């Protein structure tokens, strides 16, 4: 990342996310052209649940790892505070996702029986590796990506109408649409508060690019839910 010291940390991270947008946009464009639309939308909601259920455990492990590093790493204490705070904000979102799918006729037992594709394991599993074996800072790049694209109400309305799924199936998606802008501002504030050097920003940048690429791969791999 160039021009360190001349731009806010958050601007550098957002710039890296913007470079990845074409691939993500193309993946979603192709997804919304697939049919049958009800089964495609259901598959997408299952994917969201598969990703959401990992969010709290990831942040809890990152906070634990920060505690282990606190005596020797200046980033550890503020990172731990952020992860603990954000854990409280994300608690039970995966449960809501299961409830939303149940309201559309998809039993929780069935949703949980759907094997997460390898791309989901790549998306989430890389963060566990980096937290444990490199630095918990890298999880911030992952979170920044997942919070960067809050769904607009009008888009959710369009997906609901095209899919024929009930409004209740989109409750958690609407909640994220309302909360993600605030969460994005919080993570920007965190990036700007932390004393990040070039190596730190390269860590975050790698996590951002990998997260964008594997999220796009997750979307590309989706098939209508049987």
Image (tube, helix red, strand yellow):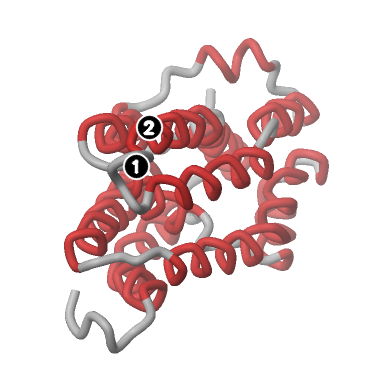
Image quarter hosting the N terminus: bottom left
Q: Quadrant of residue 206?
A: bottom left
The vertical placement of 199 against 52, above or below, is below
The residue to which callout 2 is attached is 65
Residue 190 can be seen, yes or no: yes
Write down the quadrant of residue 117 in the picture.
top left
Q: Residue furthest bottom?
A: 6
| Disc 2 packing (10 Å; few <14; some 14–19; many ≥20) | some
Residue 43 appears in the rendering: no
Q: Is residue 75 left or right of residue 164?
A: left
* Residue drawn where x is 55% and y is 36% of the image: 52
Please tell me whether residue 1 is drawn above or below residue 213 in the rendered image. below
Q: Nearer the viewer, residue 67 or 134?
A: 67
Mark 1 surroundings: few (<14), some (14-19) or many (≥20) residues within 10 A: many
- The residue at 67%/46% (across/down) is 163
**Mark drawn on residue 136:** 1
Name the mark on residue 99: none
Relative to 14, say whether 27 is above or below: above
Rendering coords of residue 137 (x, y %): 34, 49
Q: Secondary structure at mark 2?
A: helix
At a point 46% along the width and 68% down the height, the residue shown is: 193
Cα separation between marks 1 and 2 = 7 Å
- In the image: residue 82, left or right of residue 122: right
Left/right placement of residue 215 relative to residue 19 reads: right
On the image, the x and y values in percent for residue 179 come to 69, 58
In contact (CB < 8 Å): disc 1 and disc 2: yes
The residue located at (51%, 31%) in the rendering is 60
Q: Earlier in the sequence, mark 1 or mark 2?
A: 2
């Amino acid at each position: 990342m160039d021009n360190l010291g001349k731009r806010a940390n958050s601007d550098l991270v957002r710039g890296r996310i913007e470079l990845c947008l074409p691939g993500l946009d193309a993946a979603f464009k192709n997804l919304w052209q697939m049919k049958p639309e009800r089964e495609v939308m259901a598959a997408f909601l299952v994917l969201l649940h598969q990703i959401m259920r990992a969010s709290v455990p990831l942040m809890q492990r990152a906070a634990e790892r920060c505690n282990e590093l606190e005596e020797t790493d200046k980033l550890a204490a503020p990172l731990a505070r952020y992860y603990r705070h954000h854990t409280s904000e994300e608690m039970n979102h995966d449960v809501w996702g299961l409830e939303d799918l149940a309201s559309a006729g998809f039993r929780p037992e069935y949703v949980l029986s759907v094997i997460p594709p390898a791309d989901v394991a790549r998306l989430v599993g890389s963060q566990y590796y980096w937290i444990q074996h490199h630095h918990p800072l890298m999880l911030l790049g992952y979170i920044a990506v997942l919070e960067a694209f809050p769904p607009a109400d009008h888009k959710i309305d369009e997906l609901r109408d095209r899919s024929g799924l009930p409004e209740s199936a989109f409750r958690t998606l609407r909640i994220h649409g309302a909360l993600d802008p605030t969460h994005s501002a919080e993570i920007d504030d965190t990036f700007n508060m932390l004393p990040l050097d070039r190596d730190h920003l390269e860590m975050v940048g790698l996590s951002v690019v990998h997260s964008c690429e594997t999220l796009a791969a997750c979307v590309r791999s989706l098939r209508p839910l049987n």
